[in-house]
Image (cartoon, rainbow, N blue to C red):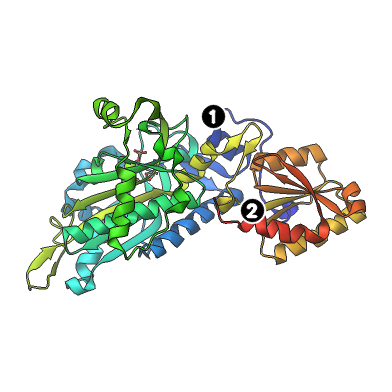
Amino acid sequence: MRLSKFFMPVLRDDPKEAEIVSHRLMLRCGMIRQETGGIYSWLPLGFRVLTKIMDIVREEQARAGGLEMLMPTIQPASLWRESGRYDDYGKEMLRITDRRDNELLYGPTNEEMITSIVKSSVQSYKDLPLNLYHIQWKFRDEIRPRFGVMRGREFLMKDGYSFDLTEEAGREAYNRMFVSYLRTFAAMGLKAIPMRAETGPIGGNESHEFLILAETGESGVFFDKAFLEKDWSGVDIDYDDAGAVAGVVKEFTSLYAATEDIHDPAAFEREVPEDRRVSGRGIEVGQIFFFGTKYSKPMGCAVQGPDGKEVYLQSGSYGIGVSRLVAGIIEASHDEAGIIWPQPVAPFDLGLINLRQGDAATDGACEKLYEELSNAGLDVLYDDRSDRAGEKFTRMDLIGLPWQVVIGPRGVKSGMAEVKNRATGEKTDVPFDTLTGLMLDKCTEVYA
Ligand code: ATP
Ligand code: MG
């Protein structure tokens, strides 16, 4: 992509309304624009990151047996009356009446709808297990939408739902999702710590939240330092091996970790040696619930079991805050100069900077390398604008692509580009003829 043809309205100054760094940087880079309180447009740069996050979520869901589908944003109120949640949900639910006076709502979550879909189409235990998910916009009329997309009113969520015949199978489905979440967040370059959690309006008796550490997080967290020393990326798993999956869940849940809502100071002191007790703040990027028959019973979602008897299905639900993650990753990965994207979610793999746009030799070298890098399958943002070099460097640091390839008249003479690693600041001179191979290696290295 040529910057001259891209739409990336970078702001020169810090927007006054932004209280936290991710919100400030997202506005400054031209990733999002607020339309009204808690509702945002995603501009091309921001949308690229959102898409990368969705891709990673999809890949791991598929591996763990999740089937993707798409349910609507608008739901009939009648569904929510069946489960009894229509009145309980309160003012957070956006209620809508259509021209025929039908009562509708903008979905804050989809337990009722998916239960009704499964109820109408699944008759026998032979059709189970099922694990269905979608990535769809949700609306919750939060009292205090703030921090940009971190706590929006309209936000993008991946929500999945499992349906099993027995409680044991249901808990195995929960375990698979638990492990898939560890792997999903690790694939984005994050360590999301699973913490025992309250179940809130979703209900049920077992739940874990996944939190990434950040000073600006809204939740107080208490956990064993051993979490930080664990190698997340090493969680390699065969999802068909229920014992192995349960083993990973046990490994991660046997260490103390809790949010302030359910933190137990006495247990913390008992279970964790003093030098390993860590407290801080975290951002909730996902939550999973096992609630058994909480929805299937009131909504009559049952199948015929092997003995011919009707059995209510055992279910769980599994959410990931896709749009919140964009901000969460920035909170976890930035410096004074701007964002530092982990490679797997970066909007482009690298930025190519032409230091002397208009100089025939420099333009020629840049064009050639741009073509080579692109043909190799890399996503390149080519700064082909005629701005001053300083401005180009500042902008490229701000938007935080993992690698910068800088080419100026001097380098063209010696056949060298300067390659800068955005995270470490390290710079190396690389001959033009080995540049594409090197960048291909760097950008596709498995995230460690
Ligand atoms: P919170 O406690 O932050 O309000 P929640 O527990 O109500 O979130 P869930 O029902 O667990 O939210 O939704 C699944 C995920 O969706 C959350 O883990 C979070 O990452 C994301 N999410 C929830 N509410 C919002 C919001 N208002 N804006 C952006 N993302 C959100
Ligand atoms: Mg939650």
Instruction: Count neighbours of disc 2 (C-alpha within 10 A) and say few if under 14, some if 14 to 19, many if 20 or more.
Output: many
Figure quadrant of the N terminus: bottom right
Residue, x 71% and y 66% (percent of image)? 375
Residue, x 47% and y 30% (percent of image)? 216
Mark 2 against mark 1, which lies toward the viewer?
2
- Tell me if residue 106 can be seen: no
At mark 1, the secondary structure is loop
- Tell me if residue 92 can be seen: yes
Instruction: Count neighbours of disc 1 (C-alpha within 10 A) and say few if under 14, some if 14 to 19, many if 20 or more.
Output: few
Q: Tell me residue 423's x, y (percent).
A: 64, 41
**35 with respect to 134 (left or right):** right
Judging by the rendered image, the residue that carries numbered circle 1 is 17
**295 with respect to 244 (left or right):** left
At mark 2, the secondary structure is loop
Q: Tell me residue 124's x, y (percent).
A: 17, 73
**37 with respect to 49 (left or right):** left
Judging by the rendered image, the residue that carries numbered circle 2 is 348
The answer to which of 324 and 87 lies nearer the viewer is 324
Residue, x 52% and y 36% (percent of image)? 331
Q: Amino acid at mark 1?
A: Glu
Q: Is residue 240 above or below residue 22?
A: below
Q: Quadrant of ligand 2?
A: top left
**236 with respect to 306 (left or right):** right
Query: Which callout, 2 or 1, points at the residue further toward the start of the chain?
Result: 1
